[in-house]
Amino acid sequence: MTEERPMQIGELAERTGLSIRTLRHYDEIGLLRPSARTEGGFRLYTADDESRLLLIRRMKPLGYSLEQMGDLLAVVDGLEADPDDAGLRERFAGIRDEAQRRREDLRRKVAAADEFVAQLEAR
């Protein structure tokens, strides 16, 4: 299996639809650290970093705060290290249930927005 070459911040931003500024901020607050840096200090990201970033991006529409995102990522990281940790599995189940509640709330809001747009188009 061949290993993919690392991406610089601009490529990762382009691939994920997020801004370079956002990626730098995520690095500063510890939400998404680059896997490596060049000798010149440029951030280098891997496919795993991209997957993590996409998970973060998917939390945004559900209204998660950066702190909540960090908490979720800590649970995910913990479960990768120890899948049998009962406490982490319980926390993960709670996070999953909360995500489902948020998704349902968002679905209701989108339905209301669709009704509003339909009313406007009918005029």
Image: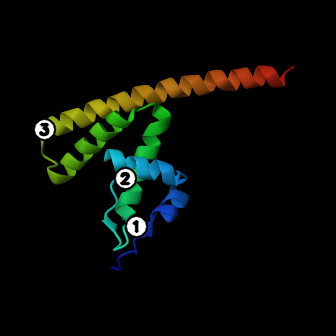
Label 2 environment density (alpha carbons within 10 Å; few <14, some 14–19, many ≥20):
some
Question: In the depicted view, which residue is nearer to us: 49 or 95?
Answer: 49
**Can you say whether 45 is above or below 99 in the image?**
below
Q: Is residue 23 toward the left or the right of residue 75 in the image?
A: right
Q: Nearer the viewer, mark 3 or mark 2?
A: 2
Q: Are marks 2 and 1 in contact (CB under 8 Å)?
A: no
Q: Nearer the viewer, mark 2 or mark 1?
A: 1
* Residue underneath mark 2: 52
**Can you say whether 111 is above or below 79 in the image?**
above
Count of marks placed on residues: 3
* Residue underneath mark 1: 42
Q: Amino acid at mark 2?
A: Arg
Q: Please identify the quarter of the rendering in which residue 1 is found.
A: bottom left
Q: Which residue is found at the position 19% from the left and 33% from the top? A: 90
Label 3 environment density (alpha carbons within 10 Å; few <14, some 14–19, many ≥20):
few
Q: Amino acid at mark 1?
A: Phe
Identify the element where label 2 is drawn.
Answer: helix
Residue 82: x, y in percent? 14, 50
Q: Who comes first in sequence, dot 3 or dot 2?
A: 2
Q: Who comes first in sequence, dot 2 or dot 1?
A: 1
Label at residue 86: 3
* Mark 2 and mark 1: Cα distance apart in space: 19 Å
